[in-house]
């Protein structure tokens, strides 16, 4: 029987070309067994101080893992979740739990010779449509339309563009200019490819503005509007949803099944955003999928970090028919293309869950060390 020998949190800092070259940070978790099998997990901890805090919590929780059989991953998950009862099961503790949980599922698959999708009970969707998940950087919207049209021509089945992001594009600030951008995209793409917008943190829209602009985008067939308002603005979301037919996405900031249950019960969401690197790993995400399936809503994986999260998100997405599409970052980047032996990419606009043991990614440890946070 394999036993857990070592639990090591490793935060990384890396330039993200899909975010205008800005430095982003993550906390990986490397768990090794006494017979030399290694599992990898990830928390989308983002800021350096959150990365350091996540490392401290993972190190602190490691006594609940050392000496245990990694095949007992759900029991271990329950134990580490229980440990944080006093300092709060959400926030940093959820990051730590997420990274540990994903690494344990990876180990369980490697030990048993099963892929994650097999452990989840098999693929309900054998191939999922892929869209390019992007930010716009250029001051010239014509250039941005050309750039995004190239993505669609290369096989992506649509685009999701972040508004209010870094760079010169300044999308999300001027009503007429934004609507014109949507019009130009639709005219360039033709009728079929999906177009979605995701309001960035720095934009402050109120309910009437969000409703008006979503209705204007709707003229050109917007698939969904994501995070149009702050998550606590329940009345604002209700106003928006009563005026628009476009799907509304929100939820990526939730930490737990309890929060997701309240979100779904509030009736403000069509597409529930979720990241295994935040919600409690594969175990936490699975619980959300159960809620989404019961409610006949949709979920969408917020997979915008490393190939570890992409692998986990992909299997989870394929395990249910309540997932509409899968996002890939279109520009080659360190945490996807350098980190693993076989980077994820679409084939003719579709992607399938990996069929190799565990998460199905082979991590290059030298790359982890290269980007290790100093
Ligand atoms: Mg988003």
Image (cartoon, rainbow, N blue to C red):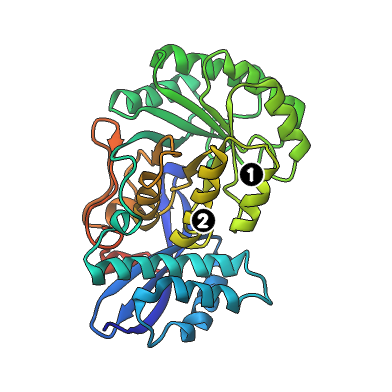
Answer with left or right where residue 203 lies relative to residue 40: right
**Residue in the foreground of this view, choosing between 369 and 350:** 350
Residue 11 shows in this picture: no
Question: The N terminus appears in which quarter of the rendering?
Answer: bottom left
Answer few, some or many: residues within 10 Å of disc 2's Cα (few below 14, many 20 plus, some between 14 and 19): some
Residue 370: x %, y % from top left:
33, 66
Task: Determine which residue is flagged by label 1.
Answer: 264
Residue 132: x %, y % from top left:
39, 34
Location of residue 54 (image quadrant): bottom right
Secondary structure under tag 2 reads helix
Q: How many marks?
A: 2
**Residue in the foreground of this view, choosing between 345 and 249:** 249
Q: Is residue 48 above or below residue 238?
A: below
Residue 241 shows in this picture: yes
Answer few, some or many: residues within 10 Å of disc 1's Cα (few below 14, many 20 plus, some between 14 and 19): some
Q: Is the C-beta of the residue carrying label 2 under 8 Å from the nearest atom of ligand 1?
A: no
Q: Earlier in the sequence, mark 1 or mark 2?
A: 1
Q: Tell me whether circle 1 and circle 2 mark residues in contact (CB < 8 Å).
A: no
Q: Which mark is residue 117?
A: none
Residue 259: x %, y % from top left:
65, 54
**Residue in the foreground of this view, choosing between 372 and 37:** 37
Question: The C terminus appears in which quarter of the rendering?
Answer: bottom left
Residue 147: x %, y % from top left:
38, 26
Q: Which residue is rendered at x = 44% and y = 68% of the image?
A: 101
Q: Is residue 9 above or below residue 219?
A: below
Secondary structure under tag 1 reads helix
Q: Give the Cα separation between the discs numbered 1 and 2.
A: 13 Å
Task: Determine which residue is flagged by label 2.
Answer: 287
Q: Which residue is rendered at x = 35% and y = 45% of the image?
A: 318
Quadrant observed for ligand 1 in the rendered image? top right
């Amino acid at each position: 029987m394999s036993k857990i020998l070592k639990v090591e949190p490793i935060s990384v800092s890396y330039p993200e070309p899909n975010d205008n070259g800005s430095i982003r940070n993550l906390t990986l978790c490397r768990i090794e067994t006494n017979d030399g099998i290694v599992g990898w997990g990830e928390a989308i901890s983002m800021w350096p101080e959150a990365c350091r805090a996540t490392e401290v919590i993972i190190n602190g929780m490691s006594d609940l893992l050392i000496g245990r059989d990694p095949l007992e991953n759900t029991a271990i998950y329950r134990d580490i979740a229980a440990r944080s009862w006093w300092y709060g099961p959400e926030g940093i503790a959820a990051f730590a739990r997420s990274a540990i949980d994903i690494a344990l599922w990876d180990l369980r698959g490697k030990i048993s010779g099963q892929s994650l999708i097999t452990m989840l009970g098999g693929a309900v969707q054998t191939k999922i449509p892929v869209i390019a998940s992007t930010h716009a950087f250029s001051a010239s919207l014509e250039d941005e339309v050309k750039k995004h049209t190239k993505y669609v021509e290369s096989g992506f089945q649509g685009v999701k563009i972040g508004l209010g992001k870094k760079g010169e594009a300044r999308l999300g600030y001027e009503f007429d200019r934004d609507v014109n951008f949507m019009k130009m995209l639709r005219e360039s793409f033709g009728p079929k490819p999906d177009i979605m917008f995701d309001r960035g943190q720095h934009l402050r829209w109120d309910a009437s503005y969000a409703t008006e602009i979503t209705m204007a985008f709707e003229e050109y067939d917007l698939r969904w509007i994501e995070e149009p308002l702050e998550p606590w603005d329940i009345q604002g979301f209700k106003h928006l949803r009563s005026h628009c037919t476009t799907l509304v996405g929100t939820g990526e900031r939730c930490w737990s099944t309890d929060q997701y249950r309240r979100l779904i019960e509030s009736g403000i969401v069509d597409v529930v955003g979720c990241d295994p690197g935040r919600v409690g790993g594969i175990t936490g995400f699975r619980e959300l999928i159960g809620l989404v399936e019961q409610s006949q809503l949709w979920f969408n994986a917020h997979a915008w970090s490393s190939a570890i999260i992409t692998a986990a998100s992909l299997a989870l997405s394929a395990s249910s028919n309540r997932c509409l599409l899968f996002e890939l970052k279109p520009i080659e980047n360190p945490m996807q293309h350098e980190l693993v032996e076989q980077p994820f990419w679409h084939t003719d606009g579709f992607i399938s869950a990996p069929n190799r043991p565990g998460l199905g990614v082979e991590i290059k440890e030298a790359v982890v060390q290269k980007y290790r946070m100093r």
